[in-house]
């Protein structure tokens, strides 16, 4: 009844200079080493560190049997003017069933019951292939960059590439879907464009962003903007962690502590609602060695033992919070998680940045340090009737959870 995904074939997609429209062509690559680095770098023009060749080369090391990548360069008259990036995930029946178990149970449908039985009897089979235009490791619009004159042309080019890649990955007739993520409503989240092509939109957890007031010199200046209640709260948090030693890690120290960092990261990962890809132990070491100058890692030590860390990127106008890790056994005593949030704020102030992207998850706690939610939209296109059936609980699973926004600032 259910057609499983074939092995990824469709090598025609790898033929160079395939035509899109007008003078636009594209070339797709499976391996990062086969990409002409100079052309990729020219197309990106330093506009997005998360689409840079060096960063994607790090991510490519995360390739596995069930997780891989596609890289596309778009040309105008053979001049590289943009890139599109894909991540391809194969879900086993057991993993997919675990993700949507609650939603499947709530569906009062014969087809849902049949599908649930199918999952139970084929737990090790690949049951869904998700082709994502974007980066599942990071929140935000990191699926493509094009240097063209209009939003309409950008969308048409991206749409053309997505369609070609989808067909090449043998998606037609399979239990699978195309996901395009994450868009701000004011960016490329234009519903009219995506609706015309049978994409369905849904909201995910918002990106939590802090816009820093002007004239700040220290973290104390920032906390002074809070109401008395939240000033006292912040002071108590920082006091709780004051006995810890904070250190900016060097390349050698990141290498030395990589297993400890991976263990701490895994503790946080295991609490996540959606466990898509588990980073390898060498990820943080690989990023720092990739000579991405904006990347840094801070760690907190209890005597000689690392009990938490936070890494981020200092970009042109903002600090981008990246992965964190901490020991839950010490979290409450030393306020590890909230200390990490304040460390991102302090980093942005010291580096004279205007905002901090704190990413998704823990939205309510992040509002207590001044973050505000920015809606993120995703678009998904099921490939057949069965895909539509399982997409509904899948999207329900990814819906934002309810939370209460807080305002730590003084009332004006």
Image (spheres, helix red, strand yellow):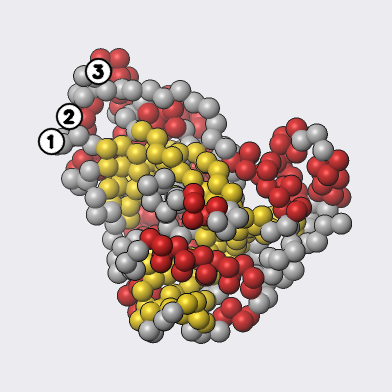
**From the image, which quarter does the N terminus lie in?**
bottom right
As measured in the structure, the alpha-carbon distance from the residue carrying label 3 to the one carrying label 2 is: 17 Å
Q: Residue at x 25, y 15 (%)?
A: 228
Question: Is the residue 13 above or below the residue 46 in the image?
Answer: below
**From the image, which quarter does the C terminus lie in?**
top left
User: What kind of element bears circle 1?
Assistant: loop
Q: Is residue 6 left or right of residue 60?
A: right
Comparing 388 with 153, the one in front is 153
Q: Residue at x 44, y 27 (%)?
A: 364
On the image, the x and y values in percent for residue 259 come to 49, 52
Name the residue carrying label 1. Answer: 215
Viewer-nearest of discs 1 and 3: 3
As measured in the structure, the alpha-carbon distance from the residue carrying label 1 to the one carrying label 2 is: 9 Å
Badge 3 density bin: few <14, some 14–19, many ≥20, Cα 10 Å:
few
Considering only order in the chain, which callout, 2 or 3, is on the residue closer to the N terminus? 2
State if disc 2 and disc 1 touch (CB < 8 Å).
Answer: yes
Badge 2 density bin: few <14, some 14–19, many ≥20, Cα 10 Å:
few
As measured in the structure, the alpha-carbon distance from the residue carrying label 1 to the one carrying label 3 is: 19 Å
Considering only order in the chain, which callout, 3 or 1, is on the residue closer to the N terminus? 1
User: What kind of element bears circle 2?
Assistant: helix
Question: Tag count in the figure?
Answer: 3
Name the residue carrying label 2. Answer: 221
Q: Is residue 392 left or right of residue 247?
A: right
On the image, the x and y values in percent for residue 304 come to 38, 40
Name the residue carrying label 3. Answer: 411
On the image, the x and y values in percent for residue 166 come to 62, 67
Viewer-nearest of discs 1 and 2: 1
Q: Confirm whether residue 120 shows in the render.
A: no
State if disc 2 and disc 3 touch (CB < 8 Å).
Answer: no
Considering only order in the chain, which callout, 2 or 1, is on the residue closer to the N terminus? 1
């Amino acid at each position: 009844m259910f057609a499983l995904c074939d092995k990824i074939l469709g090598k025609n997609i790898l033929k160079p200079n395939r035509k899109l429209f007008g003078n636009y062509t594209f070339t797709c690559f499976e391996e990062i080493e086969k990409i002409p680095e100079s052309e990729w770098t020219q197309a990106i023009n330093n506009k997005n560190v998360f689409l840079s060749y060096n960063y994607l080369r790090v991510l490519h090391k995360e390739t596995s049997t069930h997780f891989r990548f596609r890289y596309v360069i778009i040309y105008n008259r053979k001049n590289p003017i943009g890139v599109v990036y894909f991540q391809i995930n194969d879900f086993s029946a057991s993993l997919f069933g675990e993700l949507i178990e609650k939603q499947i149970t709530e569906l009062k449908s014969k087809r849902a019951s049949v599908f649930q039985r199918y999952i139970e009897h084929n737990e090790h089979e690949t049951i869904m292939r998700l082709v994502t235009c974007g980066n599942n490791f990071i929140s935000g619009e990191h699926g493509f960059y094009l240097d063209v004159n209009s939003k309409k042309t950008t969308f048409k080019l991206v749409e053309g590439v997505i369609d070609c890649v989808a067909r090449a990955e043998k998606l037609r007739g399979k239990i699978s879907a195309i996901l395009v993520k994450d868009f701000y409503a004011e960016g490329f989240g234009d519903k009219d464009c995506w609706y015309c092509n049978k994409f369905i939109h849904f909201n995910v957890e918002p990106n939590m962003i802090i816009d820093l007031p002007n004239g700040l010199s220290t973290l104390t200046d920032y906390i002074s903007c809070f109401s008395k209640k939240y000033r006292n709260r912040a002071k108590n948090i920082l006091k709780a962690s004051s006995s810890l030693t904070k250190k900016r890690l060097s390349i050698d120290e990141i290498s030395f502590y990589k297993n400890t960092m991976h263990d701490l990261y895994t503790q946080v990962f295991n609490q996540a609602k959606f466990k898509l890809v588990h980073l390898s132990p060498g990820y943080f070491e690989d990023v720092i060695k990739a000579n991405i100058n904006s990347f840094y890692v801070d760690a907190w030590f209890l005597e000689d033992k690392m009990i938490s860390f936070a890494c981020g990127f200092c970009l042109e106008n903002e600090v981008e919070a990246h992965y964190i890790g901490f020991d839950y056994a010490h979290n409450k005593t030393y306020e590890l998680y909230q200390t990490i949030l304040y460390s991102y704020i302090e980093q942005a102030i010291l580096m004279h940045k205007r905002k901090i992207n704190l990413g998704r998850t823990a939205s309510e706690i992040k509002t207590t340090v001044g973050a505000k939610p920015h809606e993120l939209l995703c678009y998904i296109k099921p490939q057949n009737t069965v895909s539509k059936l399982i997409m509904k609980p899948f999207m329900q699973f990814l819906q934002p959870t309810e939370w209460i926004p807080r305002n730590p600032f003084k009332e004006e």
